[in-house]
Amino acid sequence: MSHEKQPLPLKGLRHLALKVTDIGKSRRFYEGILGMRIVWEPDPENLYLSFGSDNLALHQIPPGETPAEEKGQRLDHFGFIAENESVVDAMAIKMERAGVPIVKPVKRHRDGSYSFYMADPDGNVIQVLYEPHISPLP
């Protein structure tokens, strides 16, 4: 009897939802600076953006609601995969010129990946990453 686990029929982590303090600022960052495309805006408090097969939902924190970090939810960072290392370098320069806070500068990691970290208007940390095993995938 084999004890190998069969993978679930999932396609990957392609959807992320963030609560934001100012949806207008977040929209300007994700659409205007990062270049994501708006795919659905059901109302002024919710916005869905896309990079190809990835989907990011932004949800305005209602007035008086406790922010997620005070409820014990901790997101360390999330990332966007880059096609190659020169894309990482170009994105780092573009983000610096746009005044986006750079949390950690470009560096090569022990596993051979290459990345930098920046912060969105709410301080969420975003990694732009070339990862040799994932970056070549369609």
Image (cartoon, rainbow, N blue to C red):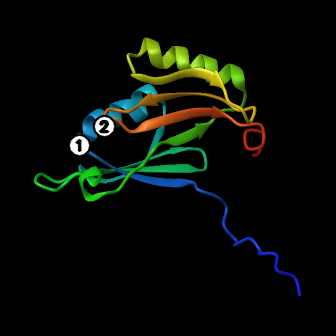
Q: Which residue is situated farthest in the bottom direction here?
A: 1
Q: For the image shown, how many numbered marks are present on the structure?
A: 2
Q: Which residue is situated farthest in the right direction here?
A: 1
Q: Earlier in the sequence, mark 1 or mark 2?
A: 1
Query: Callout 2: few (<14), some (14-19), or many (20+) C-alpha neighbours within 10 Å?
Result: some
Residue 133 placement (x, y as % from top left): 78, 43
Residue drawn where x is 23% and y is 49% of the image: 44
Query: Callout 1: few (<14), some (14-19), or many (20+) C-alpha neighbours within 10 Å?
Result: some
Q: Is mark 1 on a helix, strand or loop?
A: loop
Residue drawn where x is 60% and y is 17% of the image: 90
**Kind of residue sitting beneath label 2:** Asp
Q: Which residue is situated farthest in the front direction here?
A: 110
Residue 48 relative to residue 127: left or right:
left
Check disc 1 and report the residue beneath it: 21
- Quadrant containing the N terminus is bottom right
Residue 57 relative to residue 22: left or right:
right
| Contact between labelled residues 2 and 1, with CB atoms less than 8 Å apart | yes
Residue drawn where x is 30% and y is 37% of the image: 122
Give above or below for 112 relative to 50: above
Foreground residue, 3 or 36?
3
**Kind of residue sitting beneath label 1:** Thr
Q: Residue 122 carries which label?
A: 2
Residue 86 placement (x, y as % from top left): 69, 19
Residue drawn where x is 44% and y is 11% of the image: 97
Q: How far apart are marks 1 and 2 (CA)?
A: 7 Å
Residue 49 relative to residue 13: left or right:
left
Residue 9 relative to residue 35: left or right:
right
Residue 101 placement (x, y as % from top left): 39, 22
Q: Is mark 2 on a helix, strand or loop?
A: loop
